[in-house]
Image: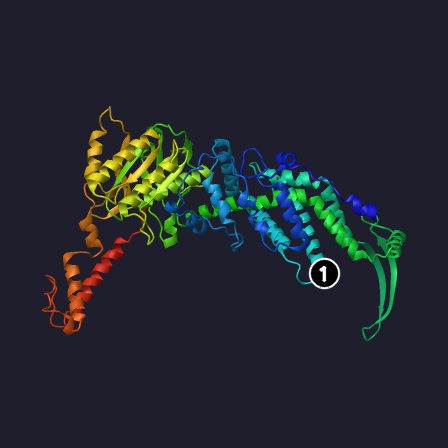
Amino acid sequence: MSDSFGSAHTVAPAPDKLAPYLPDLLHGVPSVALDHAKVCRSLCIAFSTGDAEQSLERIMDDARMCPSSWGGSSFHEGLYMNVLVSHCMKVTVGGQRPKTNMRYLLRLLDNPPSDAPTREFRRTIIAELVARPDLRADFEATYVEIHKLRTELQALDNVGYYDSRVRRLFVLSLLRDLMRNLQRRFDGATSGLSRITAYANYVAQTEGFGHLCDLLEYEEQLSNVQFKMRLGADGSLRRFEIVDVQENRGNRFYQGPLRRFLAKFGLWVRGYRIGESGLLDAWLEEVFNGMVPYVPAVLRLLGEQEFYLAGLSFRDQCQRQGLATSFPIMLEPDAPAHALKVEGLFNPLLFTQGSTPVPCGLDGEAIASKAILTGPNSGGKTRLLQALGITQVLAEAGLYAPVASATIPRANGLFVSLVEEGTVDQSEGRLGMELLRIRRLFEHAQVGSLVILDELCSGTNPSEGEEIFLLVLSLLEDLDARSMVATHFLDFARRLQHETRADDSPLRLAFLQVDVGANDLPTYQFRSGVAQTSMAQQTAARLGVTDSVLRALVHRQRLAAPETSRGGRIPPPPFGVEIGGPHGGACEVTELFEAVDARKAAAQRVHIG
């Protein structure tokens, strides 16, 4: 008995010895990303008693990231990354939404790989999952099985002793079945998915896995018994006869009747009361200890699968909206402008509004240098800035980006800052907050970064704002940073456009403006140049902020007020609006505002801005 129990013990391989065999789906060269000893301890505790603190769900929080130059980047708030991941990249498997590790997914997007081979390694995996629906089905089935294994490991033993043993047996059976399934599922894969099968084959050859299979076979089939039964006319059992008993003697855990009797008798004489169930508990623990070194890689695989499932979900959602996605071609940061192009760019954040974005395109000059973006409000400037940032993030991470096709430079970092709303506890005014925003820019932006700014220096008067604006552009030039900056300083932008045409200009600038249609409404497309006007009057008319509308509002409020509080005569109705008496003009005023609302609704086209 003791020999059988002791034979299940195996020496745990060192993490660095396991590294070449790990099913690493995120790195070109497999690496150990977890604290192996810490995860193994958590697994042993979870197997024995359950995981009361749900620590197994958080093991990827501290996983080591691949080498990345984006450590100082700052773009979460401006790109609404939490919303992007939770709404536009939500993992759905079999119609269900499993609980995913949002923190880990965001960390992966925060730290895209610096080396191109790792990025291409990721792209080949997700591309193969798209190209082969059968492989994607196996990928999702694997995710469900690992998720179930983790759930059972985390279940608490609060029902009873017997249920504890049943749970542990179930965990071991799930682990065995998972490894056997992984041996066949990705055998024909040509991408990094083949690492999963290679790892399962490696584990299947270990002594620990052999003990696991033998124990489960012993528990499931100690012996085969043949018997005869004789039943009476009333259906009751009249005779029961055992014909043959064939014990599973080939199993390493098998013990003959005499050995079982002697072992129990010896323990009884020494004062111990250990039965078959006690031995089984000990075997369960020992067998799991033999498999523990190989389980962290399985749980890590769960987190890495969520990265790809999120990317697939993003592509699927875009396809349902009739929008094309692609892998942008990534060139070096100093790539010439003529080699760069973006087509079919859109902002996926508009999905959260139930809207379908209107794609647009950009030429190389706007991508390669510092672009000054001008145009009317509600013309798409902010949405364009977000779309560019999201495209850079997903492209660098190795996922499909919201663009039909693109050739863009690689960025050493990303800084995004849109106009910030005031807060009740802010210590500075608008100018002070703007200056702090600029300081954060140069605290985070690295050499060769992509910088995206909305409404730069909008919190101060134009003369002072222009000086700060020029300083920012000059410093971005010193950083060799690409940038896109939106502004309403149109006269200043035109002067810059004229000055930078000279060959000796110290700044490399491009100018981009919102394209406006014949009806003075934005088309949500963009072309080179500086906007002639911000179209404030057209925007005011579209939103119902005109002299006649505002006077009608004042008139309606005076009519609705009690006579004692009117404070004098009622002003005349706006020109062109007939008011017959104290309440006789209510319908005309109502019709006026309904007409305004109709114009506003017509203008709320789905757009990129």
Is the residue 72 above or below the residue 5 in the image? above
What colour scheme has been applied to the protein in the rendered image?
Answer: rainbow
Dividing the picture into quarters, in which one does residue 232 lie?
A: bottom right
| Residue furthest to the front | 427
Coordinates of residue 498 in the picture (x, y in percent)? 20, 31
- 549 or 524, which is in the foreground? 549
Residue type pointed to by label 1: Tyr
Give the residue drawn at x 41%, y 29%.
332
Using residue 128 as the reference point, say whether residue 221 is left or right of it.
right
Q: Secondary structure at mark 1?
A: helix
- The residue under label 1 is 161
Is the residue 14 above or below the residue 267 in the image? above
Using residue 581 as the reference point, say whether residue 316 is left or right of it.
right
Dividing the picture into quarters, in which one does residue 281 lie?
A: bottom right
Residue density around tag 1, few if under 14, some if 14–19, many if 20 or more, within 10 Å: few
Coordinates of residue 10 in the picture (x, y in percent)? 74, 41
- 526 or 421, which is in the foreground? 421
How many circles with numbers are drawn on the protein? Answer: 1
Using residue 314 as the reference point, say whether residue 370 is left or right of it.
left
Coordinates of residue 520 in the picture (x, y in percent)? 20, 48
Residue 453 seen in render: no
Residue 349 seen in render: yes
Using residue 71 as the reference point, say whether residue 488 is left or right of it.
left
Is the residue 73 above or below the residue 587 in the image? above
| Residue furthest to the bottom | 234
